[in-house]
Image (cartoon, rainbow, N blue to C red):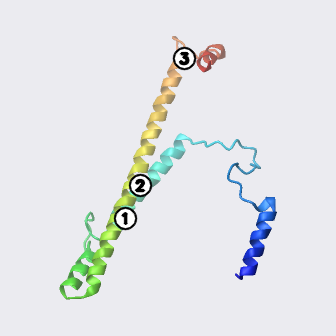
């Protein structure tokens, strides 16, 4: 892109309100929604389950160092690095460093997946318990639903 074209695009964007970025408001919602975040129990469970599946797949398939895998040939990258270093090849040290960095980053991603999965499982259970408590509170002593006039007292 030529300098003149860049300057023209900047001037056009500065002079046109429709193209300016607005960070202090949401764009108009053509569907008429409120813009509020809505999460259902099923959504939490699905995301938590997917995080757990990702954790298992990464743990089993991405362990090039062989630290946690039980597969035959696991750790072949580490073995190759050691063999190359023992024969005086400089790339052995570089491969060893690559394996160390990969393993460190893999552990970070695994921890994040486990954290997401555990947190969403906890959140799902907490909300279910809160719903049960609320349900128990809004029933009268005979187990019948309270009238709206009684329920509205909780919001004052």
Q: Position of residue 106 (x, y in %)?
A: 36, 64
88 or 106: which is nearer to us?
88
Q: Secondary structure at mark 3?
A: loop
In front: mark 1 or mark 2? 1
Q: Position of residue 70 (x, y in %)?
A: 25, 65
What is the crowding at mark 3: few (fewer than 14 residues within 10 Å), some, or many (at least 20)?
some
Q: Which mark is residue 59?
A: none
Q: Residue at x 61, y 15 (%)?
A: 153
- Give the residue at mark 1: 105
Left or right: 76 as drawn, with respect to 118? left
Calculate the distance from the C-alpha at mark 1 to the C-alpha at mark 3.
Answer: 51 Å
Residue 139 is marked as: 3
Secondary structure found at label 2: helix
Q: Quadrant of the N terminus?
A: bottom right
User: Label 1's element?
Assistant: helix
| 145 or 17: nearer the viewer | 17
Mark 2 or mark 3: which is in front? 2
Q: Residue at x 42, y 56 (%)?
A: 53
Q: Considering only order in the chain, which callout, 2 or 1, is on the residue closer to the N terminus?
A: 1
Residue that numbered label 2 is attached to: 113
Comes first in the chain, label 1 or label 3: 1
> Nearer the viewer's eye, disc 1 or disc 3?
1
Asked if the residue under mark 2 is in contact with the one under mark 1, i.e. CB atoms within 8 Å, the reply is no
Q: In percent of the image, x 23 and y 85: which residue is there?
A: 84
Q: In the figure, is residue 92 to the left or right of 146? A: left
The quadrant the C terminus occupies is: top right
Instruction: Calculate the distance from the C-alpha at mark 1 to the C-alpha at mark 2.
Output: 12 Å
* Position of 129 relative to 79 (above/below): above
Residue 96 x/y as whole percent: 27, 76
Residue, far left: 86
């Amino acid at each position: 892109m030529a300098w003149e074209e860049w300057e023209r695009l900047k001037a056009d964007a500065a002079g046109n309100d429709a193209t300016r970025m607005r960070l202090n408001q949401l764009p108009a919602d053509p569907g008429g929604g409120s813009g509020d975040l809505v999460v259902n129990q099923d959504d939490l469970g699905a995301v938590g389950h997917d995080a757990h599946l990702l954790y298992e797949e990464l743990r089993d398939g991405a362990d090039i160092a062989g630290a946690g895998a039980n597969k035959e040939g696991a750790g072949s990258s580490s073995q190759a690095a050691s063999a190359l270093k023992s024969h005086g090849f400089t790339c052995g040290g570089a491969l060893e460093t690559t394996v160390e960095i990969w393993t460190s980053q893999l552990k970070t991603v695994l921890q994040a997946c486990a954290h997401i999965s555990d947190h969403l499982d906890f959140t799902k259970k907490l909300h279910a318990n809160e719903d049960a408590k609320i349900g128990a509170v809004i029933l009268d002593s005979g187990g019948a639903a309270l009238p709206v006039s009684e329920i509205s007292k909780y919001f004052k």
